[in-house]
Structure formats: C-alpha cells, structure tokens
Image (cartoon, rainbow, N blue to C red):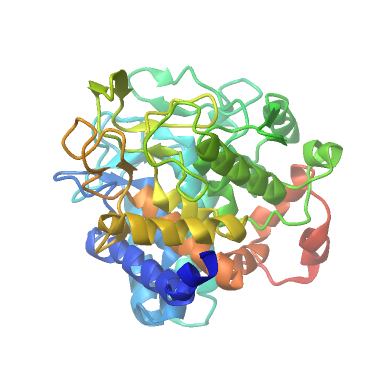
C-alpha cells in the first residue's frame, strides 16, 4: 500500500514544484527598491531582517534553478546589501541599526525601525548568513558581484559582538534604545549555534572562545521515546543553523563526548517528533506517524473551545515544542520538509500524506504556515483550520533544505566562507570536511 501511494506521487517533481512556488514569496513579498522582505503576508506587515537574510541565501538557489537569471539575482542581492550599507545607524529610536546589528522589524518602505522592536542578535546573524552566502556564490570579476562581496564583508565586519555580551559570558538576545539590553541571554541548545559560529569568526570584533563554552554549558541532554539527544523543543531549533552549516562529521567538545554530531542530533530530534505524534499523548486530531511537525508557528487562537467534551486552549503565534509543549494540535508541514536532509525516510511519507490528506495546505507560495485539525475550520472541531498566510522565516528553510537535500549547494558554498570556518574552529569543531577546508578558496 505504501509503495502504491508513492507511485502515485512524483516525489522529485513535487519537491521541485514546492521549492519553486515557495521561492515566489521572496519575489512578490519584497520591496525591489531596497530588498526588504515582508515578515508575513498579513496586511501591513513590516519587513523582518531574518526574512531578508533568507532571501539573500535563496537568490543563489534561484539562479541555479532558473527561477531568476544570475544577473537578476545579483541585482536583487546588491540592492539589498546597499540598503543596509547606507541605512541610518545609531542610538536614535528610528534608526535601522546600531553597533553593526539591525532591528528585528523594519518599515518595508523606509527601512526605519518598526513597532518599537529590539536590535536582534539572532536575526542579524541570519541576515549576515544570507549576505555571506551571496558573497560565496557571486564570485565572478564583474562589477555587481565584486560589489556584493565587498559590502557583505563590510557589513559583517561592522558588528560589535563583544558589545552584545553586555559584560557577561553569553550573548544577549537584543537591545533597545529605550531600555538597553534585554534581560535574556542565549541559554540551552537552539538556533544560536549559527549565531555563535558567526560571532566567533568575526575578523574585527570576535567573541572570546570561552563564550561558546559558556553557552554549551547550558545544554540539556535528554531521552524521549527511546531516543537520546540534545534537547530543543521546537523543530526549527534543530534546523536553522543547518541551513548553512554542514555538520556531518564535524564535532565540538560537547558532541565529541556524546559520540555523535549535530546533524545526527537533528535526525534524532526529527524522529522524536514523529514518535510523539504517533503516540499522541494529548489526543489531538490528525496526529500520526505520517502527520507531524511541531515548531514555532501561527495558530488558531487565542481561544478556548470545548471540543469532543474536552476543554481545549488554543494559541496564536507561539514556539510550540515536543514533548513538553506547548502543544495545541497545530502542525506545520514546512517544518517537516526542512528536516528532509536529516531523515528522508520519515519526511517523504509525511510529505505525501500532507499532499494527499490536506491539499488545501498548499497554495501559491507552497505550504501555508500551519494547520490545526483539532480546532477545526468552524472552531468546533469540524473541518480543518488552516492558516491564511505565510511567514518569510518558514519559506526560506524550505527552499534551502530542498536544495541541500538534492545537491548540498548551500553547504558547499559555506565551506568556502572563511569567517564561518574560522568561527567553527574557534568553537572547537574538528573532523570531516573542516579538517580539509584550509585549501579551499575564501569567500
């Protein structure tokens, strides 16, 4: 039965179609004048610098796949980088950035800080990762590509990573001109793996090596559903750094002690997600071995509904996780696809299940943000609640991980990125491709 179901679906064709349509977000939800990309498709949404960073990383994929010409991709990239190079920076509340970091949300038209948001260390790291991807890809001796490389390097060098420590041993989440540094520091395993690698690799204001050890000291190693792994509840935590870094065969001190690498850890976290859905301890509708995927996503709430004689609380946008929650029955197909390189043997059957059981989840930009069969389309558990829009932070990982699964393109590019390679080495990573990368040309 499973074989017949797979025969009915052209997996390669469906993945190629999903990647092409998902990339469309970065064409149609961007301001071509400055390269800023909407955070989401809601009316009036500001730009998110994380979405911009993902767009920058996706343009090389688009050029290789023929969604854009190389020249078109380069011009989009250059417009974006020029904006950040020329934007107002300083402690004033309506600036775009400060101390080399940038505000999380920006006005799509003007580029000024939006909604009183924070200067974000993590979102700036995603922006830098995209810029460095572009610098690695656009390597020809033509004016536009030379300028891309120059500006990407200049932006990355400007970030004052030591300032972002705020006198402590680990990085702060962010800063505002009204209140100074946010009270939160990065603790526990998360997407901050990319953040620390970039901070450690800075050629101008690098983090001290001990900051990485201080962060990894907050890790939690757990066992869930018969699987031992480095814990992180939402699935995106196990994916985001891997968009750029090929962790296969390279290990830091923590992973050397555990005898695995971060790639294997993400595979295990993906299996935990599937086993949690199969066991379905909270009895949500739709969960199964072939329908899973719990992460940060939009949701049907805030609401409380009595469904099937049981009182259920539903959230709106929230970082949902496994196995401790929060979990309100909301699933995200895009997060499943982003785990494709780690565990294709369980991702592909789930991809087929979403295509066949929930065809309304897929529209002009690929998979919508999320769905909740328990809540139901009518709020009483009848039908299937489906999110009405998309987030740039969801779209980019789909494009990039389909490409990494197919041919490892982004991973190969970033092996040539000297600052990232240096950051990994300063974090204590050894082995695999990293030991052989000294002879590779720099980005």
Picture coordinates of residue 182, whole percent (x, y): 44, 21
For the question of whether residue 205 can be seen, the reply is no
Q: Is residue 354 above or below residue 111?
A: below
Q: On the picture, is 249 further left or further right than 309?
A: right
The number of numbered discs placed on residues in the rendered structure image is 0
Q: Quadrant of residue 443?
A: bottom right
Q: Nearer the viewer, residue 131 or 243?
A: 243
For the question of whether residue 20 can be seen, the reply is yes
Q: On the picture, is 82 further left or further right than 277?
A: left
Going by the picture, which residue comes out furthest to the front?
1
Residue at x 55% of width, y 40% of height = 273
Residue at x 23% of width, y 49% of height = 389
Q: Nearer the viewer, residue 27 or 134?
A: 27
Q: On the picture, is 161 further left or further right than 249?
A: left
Picture coordinates of residue 235, whole percent (x, y): 52, 41
Q: Nearer the viewer, residue 443 or 431?
A: 431
Q: Quadrant of residue 30?
A: bottom left
Residue at x 74% of width, y 30% of height = 213
Q: Nearer the viewer, residue 198 or 143?
A: 198
Picture coordinates of residue 259, whole percent (x, y): 84, 43
Q: Is residue 381 above or below residue 46?
A: above
Picture coordinates of residue 33, whole percent (x, y): 22, 63
Q: Is residue 75 above or below residue 300?
A: below
Q: Quadrant of residue 396?
A: bottom left
């Amino acid at each position: 039965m499973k074989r017949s179901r797979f025969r009915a679906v052209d997996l390669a064709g469906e993945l190629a179609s999903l990647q092409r349509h998902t990339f469309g977000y970065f064409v149609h939800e961007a301001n071509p004048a400055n390269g800023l990309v909407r955070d989401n498709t809601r009316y009036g949404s500001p730009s998110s610098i994380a979405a911009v960073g993902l767009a920058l990383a996706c343009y090389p994929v688009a050029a290789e796949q023929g969604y854009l010409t190389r020249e078109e991709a380069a011009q989009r990239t250059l417009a974006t980088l020029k904006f950040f190079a020329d934007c107002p920076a300083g402690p004033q509340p309506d600036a775009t950035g400060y101390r080399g970091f940038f505000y999380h949300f920006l006005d799509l038209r003007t580029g000024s800080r939006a909604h009183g948001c924070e200067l974000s260390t993590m979102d700036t790291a995603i922006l830098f990762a995209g810029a460095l991807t572009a610098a690695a890809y656009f390597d020809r001796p033509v004016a536009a590509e030379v300028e891309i490389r120059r500006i990407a390097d200049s932006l990355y060098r400007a970030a004052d990573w030591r300032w972002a420590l705020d006198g402590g041993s680990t990085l702060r989440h962010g800063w505002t001109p009204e209140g100074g540094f946010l009270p939160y520091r990065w603790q526990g395993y998360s997407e901050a793996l990319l953040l620390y690698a970039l901070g450690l690799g800075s050629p101008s204001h690098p983090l001290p090596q001990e900051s990485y050890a201080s962060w990894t000291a907050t890790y939690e190693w757990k066992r869930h559903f018969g699987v031992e792994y480095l814990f992180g509840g939402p699935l995106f935590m196990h994916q985001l750094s891997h968009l750029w870094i090929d962790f296969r065969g390279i290990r830091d001190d923590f992973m050397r002690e555990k005898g695995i690498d971060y790639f294997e850890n993400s595979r295990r976290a993906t299996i935990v997600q599937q086993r949690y859905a199969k066991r379905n301890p909270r009895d949500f509708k739709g969960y199964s071995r072939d329908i899973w995927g719990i992460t940060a996503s939009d949701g049907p709430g805030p609401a409380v509904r009595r469904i099937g004689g049981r009182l259920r609380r539903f959230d709106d946008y929230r970082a949902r996780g496994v196995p401790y929650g929060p979990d309100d029955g909301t699933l995200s197909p895009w997060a499943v696809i982003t785990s494709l390189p780690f565990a294709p043997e369980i991702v592909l059957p789930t991809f087929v299940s979403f295509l066949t059981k929930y065809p309304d989840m897929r529209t002009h930009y690929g998979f919508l943000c999320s769905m909740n069969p328990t809540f139901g389309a009518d709020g009483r558990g009848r039908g299937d609640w489906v999110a009405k829009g998309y987030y740039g932070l969801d779209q980019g990982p789909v494009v990039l991980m389909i490409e990494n699964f197919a041919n490892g393109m982004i991973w190969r590019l970033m092996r040539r990125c000297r600052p990232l390679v240096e950051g990994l080495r300063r974090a204590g990573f050894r082995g695999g491709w990293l030991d052989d990368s000294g002879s590779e040309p720099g980005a």
